[in-house]
Every structure is written in C-alpha cells, then in structure tokens.
Image (cartoon, rainbow, N blue to C red):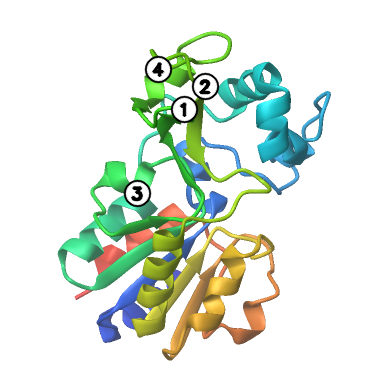
Amino acid sequence: MESAKLLSEYINRAERIVFFGGAGVSTESGIPDFRSVDGIYNMKYDYPPEEILSHDFFFEKTQEFFRFYRDKLYCPDAAPNGAHKALAELERRGKLSAVVTQNIDGLHTAAGSRKVYELHGSVKRNYCVKCGKFYDEDFVMKGEGVPRCECGGLVKPDVVLYGEPLDGDVIEGAIGAISAADLLIVAGTSLTVYPAAGFLSYYRGGDVVLINKTPTSFDGSASLVIRDPVGEVMSKALELCS
C-alpha cells in the first residue's frame, strides 16, 4: 500500500504527532458514522437525529431521547481497530503527543491511548444532573426507560449535545497539543462540525496528512491526502515505521 509507505515516512520524521479524528476512524469497528450516505443522519426517524441529540430535546422528550440513544449509539461488540491500536503504540513509542477525537465511543482509551481529548464526551460516562454521581455505560444502556440516580435525579450521558458547550479543560488541552505538534494527522472526518473542525487553525507545524474516504475542504492544505480506510493505512504505516 503506497499510501501507508508515504505516511510512515512522515511519521518517522516527526517527534510530536497529534491525531485528529472523527467518526470514520470507528467505522471499521462496526460503529456507524453520521454524515455518509448510510450514516445515522440519513436514517428516517420521527424526529431528525440532530434534534434528538440536542440539549432541549433531552430534557423535553427524555424517553424518546433514550430510545434513540440506546438503539443507535450503543455498540457493545465494538472493539478497537487497527487505527486505535496503531495510535496507542505510537504513543508508547513517544511519537504521538495526543489524540483529539470527535467520537464518543471510548475506543481510543480501550486500545491503550492515555492522552485522549474527547471533544464531545463519551458514552462510557454518565452522571446524575442532580447530585453529580457517575454511572457506567451499562447502567444507562442496559436499562429501560429513563435512567434515574438513587437520589431520584435524571442520569445524563456525559456527551456534548447540540446546544451545549464543549468542556473548557478539554478545549485547552486539545488546542495546546495541536499548537505544539510537528505533524498533524487528520482522519475520518468531514471537517464540517464546528467548533471542533476549527481547532485545526491552531496548528503551527509543517506537514498535515489527511485520511478520509471523501474530499474535504481541507484537502488543499494537506501535504498528503489518503483515501484508504483509516485502520488499514494506520496499521500498515506502523509496520513500516523504523
């Protein structure tokens, strides 16, 4: 795979790599993306998915929210793929500074990555909006109806819904990592979701590698554009790295 060979050369030259990823990073793990032809946003529901996954909808139609949430965002059999594993290994080797992800599936952490900035939160964490007690994924996903804390409060997934701000500490960490990077690998994202996509403007390094199956508005700014599956190309590139 020529693209993997080229990517390995960029990785070999770099010392502070940051990986910025979106839903396309997890599709090889069996998790559907959002904006492709077969993605969640192109499925038919009583309400548009963007409305269901909003702050107001969560509090106004909570039962309907959890019906959609459990049906479409719960993937218990999903496991880290080649991309997640390769990134964890690059971090262990001291080459990768951080992963900045728009995904909420927790697969980077499951693969062993330690420095992960989850811009949109994680389905693995849930908390009571009344007392703040945290609950694991199973408490919410394997239950029925609206999950309630032992104090009686509503249990909310620790994910950023439409109409909610990103976490300030996560933003600061992600921007700091991107600003200090000498290689930025952008993968599996259409770069249409803001403010997340705007984080790329903080990059001050040299090369940018973009891995995505469809064109993006950022293609013209990339040093290398790859159309191959993210997991495949990252795994192969790792094998070829010195």
Instruction: Determine whether, in the image, residue 197 is placed left or right of residue 183.
Output: right
Where 145 sits versus 113, above or below?
Answer: above
Secondary element at tag 4: helix
Q: Read off the residue under disc 3.
A: 108
**Residue at x 60%, y 72% (from the top left corner):** 198
Residue 58 to residue 2: above or below: above
Q: Are marks 1 and 2 in contact (CB under 8 Å)?
A: yes
Camera-side mark, 1 or 4? 1
Give percent across and percent down for residue 106.
38, 42
Q: Which residue is mark 2?
A: 154
- At 69% across and 68% down in the image, what residue appears? 215
C-alpha distance separating marks 1 and 3: 30 Å
Please say if the residues under marks 2 and 4 sit with CB atoms less than 8 Å apart: no
Q: In percent of the image, x 27 and y 70: which residue is there?
A: 96
Q: Give neighbour class at mark 3: few <14, some 14-19, many 20+ (Cα, 10 Å).
A: many
Identify which residue, 46 or 224, lies in the foreground: 46
Q: Residues within 10 Å of mark 2 (few under 14, many from 20)?
A: some
Classify the position of the C terminus by image quarter: bottom left
The residue most toward the top is 144
Give the camera-side residue of 102 and 39.
102
Q: Is residue 41 rendered to the left or right of residue 32? A: right
* First reached walking from the N terminus: tag 1 or tag 2: 1
The residues tagged by marks 1 and 4 sit, at their Cα atoms, a distance apart of: 17 Å
User: Which circle marks residue 139 in the picture?
Assistant: 4
User: Badge 1 is on which residue?
Assistant: 130
Q: Nearer the viewer, mark 3 or mark 2?
A: 2
